[in-house]
Image (cartoon, grey):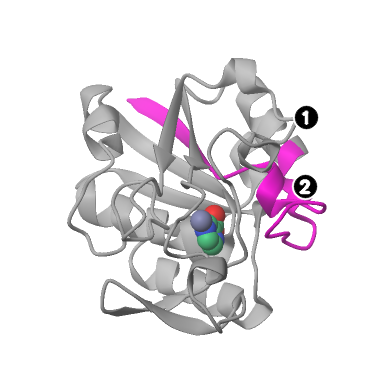
Amino acid sequence: MTRALLLIDIQNGFCPGGNLPIAEGDAVVPVANRLMKSGRYDLVVASQDWHPANHGSFASQHPGKAPFEIGELSGKPQMLWPDHCVQGTPDADFHPDLDTAAIDHVQRKGENVAVDSYSAFRDNDRAALTGLAGYLASKNVTELDLMGLATDYCVKFSALDAVDMLPGVRVAFIEDGSRGIDPEGVKSAIEEMRAAGVLITTSHDRLA
Ligand code: VGL
Ligand code: ZN
């Protein structure tokens, strides 16, 4: 039995002061650190949103469009974001209080300008894989706990892909270790994850 913890996008860009700040985004950091220290996990993986400066999900690349409007990317509807998590900038760094020494493997995503990648496992068009599913399978992962930012985007899509791409692996979402962009979106994300077979749990229950 191999237990893995997957930390989604705990980066400056998604925390207060970042370019795509999530309310209380930084509150997930102590939860992540506590879980990593607990000894519960054999493996810790962290994903990192890692965009080129001209990424097609940025409103700045769409003349006349503002952040949080719907635009088009490669012929498909795309939520347009503020420029965020640009490769090599402080906005893309992990939160400075995150215990990165305890992370075994970092999975970057969102490097292709023509497609967004909310999931840590594959691009939104499902064409290109990141390699994370193969990595976790090579480590014989049997239990995967996910948490991080944002619940209604990257955490949700990663959890749904984990169920889909890692047959037989028990997937759980750690609610208090996650924060979302839109409160209604968070509610429906949790229901979608639950319906897909993801266990909704808390760090408290995991450490009990
Ligand atoms: C994310 C929007 C754009 C996330 C990443 O990490 O949830 N959301 N890029
Ligand atoms: Zn992004």
Tags 1 and 2 touching, CB below 8 Å: yes
| Residue type, numbered disc 2 | Asp
Question: Looking at this view, is 16 or 105 the one in front?
Answer: 16
Mark 2 close to ligand 1, CB under 8 Å: no
Residue 101: tell me if it is visible. Answer: yes
Q: Residue furthest front?
A: 63
**Residue 32 point in image, percent of width and height:** 66, 36
**Residue 79 point in image, percent of width and height:** 48, 76
Q: Is residue 107 magenta?
A: no
Question: Looking at this view, is 142 or 74 the one in front?
Answer: 74
- Name the residue located 64 percent from the left edge and 37 percent from the top edge: 89
Q: Secondary structure at mark 2?
A: helix
**Split into 4 quadrants, where in the image is the N terminus?**
top left
**Residue 28 point in image, percent of width and height:** 71, 46
Q: Residue furthest top?
A: 101
Question: Looking at this view, is 26 or 43 the one in front?
Answer: 26
Residue 37, quarter of picture = top right
Residue 66, quarter of picture = bottom right
Mark 1 close to ligand 1, CB under 8 Å: no
Residue 200: tell me if it is visible. Answer: no
- Name the residue located 28 percent from the left edge and 41 percent from the top edge: 130
Q: Which residue matches tag 1?
A: 97
Q: Which residue matches tag 2?
A: 26
In the rendered structure, which disc, 1 or 2, sits on the residue that comes first in sequence?
2
- Residue 91 is left or right of residue 186, and the answer is right
| Residue type, numbered disc 1 | Asp
- Name the residue located 31 percent from the left edge and 30 percent from the top edge: 141
Q: Is residue 14 magenta?
A: yes
Q: Which residues are magenta?
A: 1-29
